[in-house]
Image: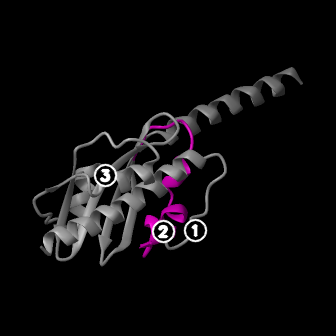
């Protein structure tokens, strides 16, 4: 009896450790995401400056100060790609976004550093963002279902998707000037 109890405890510990190590990691290198976004022929990176006309909107979405002065992006044939970071619970989550015609075409978790919430990297979660766009007050035009135990990670990606759409809109208006 003691043998089976001890074996169960050890097996549970191994499962917890293996799940925790799966949670953190690089799911796709940012450079690989950009190459894939443009079929192996990415354009040169561009910069968008977080000036006084866009910074307040970004800070409202983030609910904290934006620390960056500029953000790099890639634009080609009406498609833009963005790589953004936001803190989940304690550590940054890096995500890539592809936008075309004001709509999210792809959301991909690139680097996940938290100990829990890794489920946001799964297609069942990221698919919810396909064709999402901004409406009034820079909100998404749809509800995004959360994941139990991953609330802060879900919020981080929700915020980043809104920021990517807002930045893409800003970049497009700058290009049309």
Query: Do we see residue 38 in this rendering?
Result: no
What residue is shown with label 3?
55
Q: Is residue 16 left or right of residue 4?
A: left
What residue is shown with label 1?
143
The range drawn in magenta is: 111-139
**In terms of sequence position, does the residue under pointer 2 or pointer 3 come before the other?**
3
Mark 2 crowdedness (10 Å alpha carbons): few <14, some 14-19, many ≥20: some
Q: Residue at x 49, y 37 (%)?
A: 114
Total numbered circles: 3
SS class of the residue under badge 1? loop
Q: Residue at x 10, y 59 (%)?
A: 44
Residue 37, picture quadrant:
bottom left
Q: Is residue 3 magenta?
A: no
Q: Is residue 131 magenta?
A: yes
What residue is shown with label 2?
140
Callouts 2 and 1 close, C-beta under 8 Å: yes
Residue 112, picture quadrant:
top left
How far apart are labels 3 and 1 at the CA level?
25 Å
How far apart are labels 2 and 3 at the CA level?
18 Å
**In terms of sequence position, does the residue under pointer 3 or pointer 1 come before the other?**
3
Position of residue 18 measured from the top left corner of the image (x, y, whole percent)? 56, 36
Q: Is residue 174 left or right of residue 87?
A: left
């Amino acid at each position: 009896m003691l043998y089976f109890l001890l074996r169960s405890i050890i097996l549970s510990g191994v499962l917890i450790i293996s799940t925790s190590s799966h949670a953190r990691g690089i799911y796709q290198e940012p450079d690989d995401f950009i190459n894939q976004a443009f079929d192996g022929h990415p354009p040169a990176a561009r910069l968008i400056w977080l000036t006084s006309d866009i910074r307040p909107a970004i800070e409202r979405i983030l609910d904290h100060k934006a620390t960056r002065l500029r953000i790099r992006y890639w634009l080609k044939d009406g498609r833009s790609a963005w790589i953004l970071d936001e803190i989940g619970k304690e550590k940054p989550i890096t995500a890539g976004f592809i936008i075309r015609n004001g709509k999210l075409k792809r959301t991909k978790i690139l680097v996940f550093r938290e100990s829990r919430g890794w489920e946001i990297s799964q297609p069942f979660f990221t698919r919810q963002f396909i064709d999402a766009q901004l409406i009034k007050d820079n909100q998404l035009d749809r509800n995004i279902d959360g994941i139990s135990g991953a609330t802060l990670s879900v919020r981080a990606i929700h915020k980043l998707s809104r920021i990517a759409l807002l930045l893409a809109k800003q970049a497009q208006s700058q290009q049309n000037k």
